[in-house]
Amino acid sequence: MDIDFFCYIKRYSEAARKVATVNIIIMRTLFITLLLLECCAVAGAQKVEPDIKYRLAESYDRSGDYESAMKLYEQLFTKDSTNMVIFDALRRDYLQLKRYDEAIALIQTMLRASPNDLGLLVQLGSTYVLKSDEAKATEAWDRAIGVDPKRETTYRLVASTMMQSRLFERAIATYQRGRMVMGDPNLFSADIAYLYGVTLNYTEATREYLKMLHQNPSQLGFVQSRIAMYTGRTSGLTAATQVVEEAVKTDANNLSLHQLLAWMYMEGKKFDKAYTVIKFIDSKTNAGGHELCNFAERALRERAYDAASKAFQEVMSTFPMFDRAAQVKFGYARTLEESDAETDTLKLFGGTNPFPEHPESESKPLFTGAIAAYHRVVTQYPNTEIAGRSLLRIATLKQEKFFDLDGARSVLESLAKQYVQFPSVISEATLRLGDVYVALGNLTLAEEQYQALAGTSPVFSEQKEKATLRLAELNYFQNRFQDALSKLKGLTTNARSDVTNDALTLQIFILENLKPSDVALKEFAKADLLQRQHKYSEALQVFESTVKSFPKSDVIDETLINIGDVYTQMARYADAIAAYDRLLKEFPESIFLDRTLMKIGQVYQLGLKEKPKAIETYQQLLEKYPNSIYVTEARRRVRELRGDNI
């Protein structure tokens, strides 16, 4: 028993010793862990402090408190003078606070560690410029170039810094210095050309761009886009054109130069000169008339009708098998039409010309040549879309220019039967036929045409909107003003539509004159329809009755304009002047005054043939309404009447 007890005690003591040993190990481990955690916490606290200061400094920068931000950056830089992020932030704040000496000292501190740092040297130079010490700036930039004078990047970096300091001439000199050192006279052409453009030296800028073109003709598009930055100025366009003309004389077979010259002529609206160049290009490139055709289409778009006509005719005569012959002949017909329209008195008096004797030099009526040209297209290319469009133009001219309503209707009805395979042409013809029916006085058939188009699928949305506008006009003519306003409301929401302005004009006119007693508006609408139908005597009677019966109505100013227009169409020019003059005197706040003066000027010039009165009227418009849309035309007519060189 004693022996067993002794053995038990011995075993218990050994177990207790093991447990104690384990506890000591655990305690030591715990102590070491706590010690490590404390060290990490201290180290973390030391790291967090700069991060907090940096974020706070950034916050001060964002709020514009550069002084507070600078102080924090200075503290951070003192502790970590190799941190480029802190250096750059501190330098920026010095510059913001115009503390240029501190900024220079800061950059020089960094340069002592990296004396050949190109970025630091150019920054030093730009800071000296801000301090107005160009000598020191030059010294810094020279040091920068000296670091690696055989690399393009060196000159680009230095020159771009000079550009930021608005030292454009110095930047040009730096690029040219790089050219000499590297032995490449074409180096930096784009950069130098841009700088010459900035300094308004358009001649040298163009010469630099031509160097690029000589190196790589495929850069023609880029060169044009860069030169276009200053050809909007007369001096820039003149200088650039002269340089390119000289280059073409020196290198007459360089097609890219010819293409550039043609483009410049067109930019300067010198389409006659451009035509000669384009003809040369077409021949040299064996384009088979395509260059001429493209030129003709651009000239037509830009109203250079003489040049367009010559180009279209050249294609037709020289390339009878041209693959786009139908389009060329249609384009030629359009040119004849638009050329005649140019002389058609700005369309201020409606579609037809109220001065049939003008221009006196015309040996045949206007638009007859265009109609004949359209007929040739129809004959040579029957049952094609281009023929359908030609018929549409014929019908339009018959209706608008000659008021040959039966002729227009016949063409449109024939078109509707024979060209159903061209929906876009048919939709335009349907709309035009409705207009013809309105002029003929058959509003029921007109409504059927418009309704047929307005109710179709949304494929031809523009034509649908026009048809809806026409239906609103019919409602207006029929004194159904609320119905008209309901239709117009839906047309005035689409700002991108061409119909919107016309819809807004009619909507505003109805709303402004829709009084509790709308008799004046009803009478005006009645006369308006009669005038559209060329029933001038009847329209005049209703207009004049409206003025007498409702002298205080808001519609009177517009009524007087229409009376003047009707008298003009009836060749009663003195009566027209009287009506217009009454508007000017009795309605000095009317929005139609500038337009009225333009009409008076034309009546004096083209109707009464009183040149001094016409000049006086146009000058009155120029003086009183310098922002009018008619200013350019009025000024042109004054010069024409005076015999000035235009």
Image (spheres, helix red, strand yellow):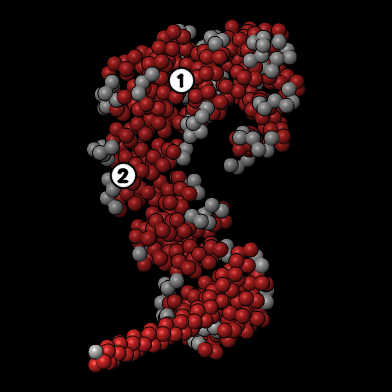
Does any portion of residue 370 appear in the rendered image? no
Image quarter of residue 325? top left
Residue at 43% from the left image edge and 41% from the top image edge: 299
Label 2 sits on what residue type? His
The kind of secondary structure element at disc 2 is: helix
Coordinates of residue 457 in the picture (x, y in percent): 35, 23
Image quarter of residue 505? top right
Residue at mark 1? 468
Which residue is at the front of the view, 164 or 610? 164
* For residue 348, above or below residue 212: above
Coordinates of residue 419 in the picture (x, y in percent): 28, 21
* For residue 180, above or below residue 585: below
Q: Residues within 10 Å of mark 1 (few under 14, many from 20)?
A: many
Task: Give the alpha-carbon distance from disc 2 to disc 1, as whole Å.
Answer: 40 Å
The kind of secondary structure element at disc 1 is: helix
Residue at 49% from the left image edge and 69% from the top image edge: 192
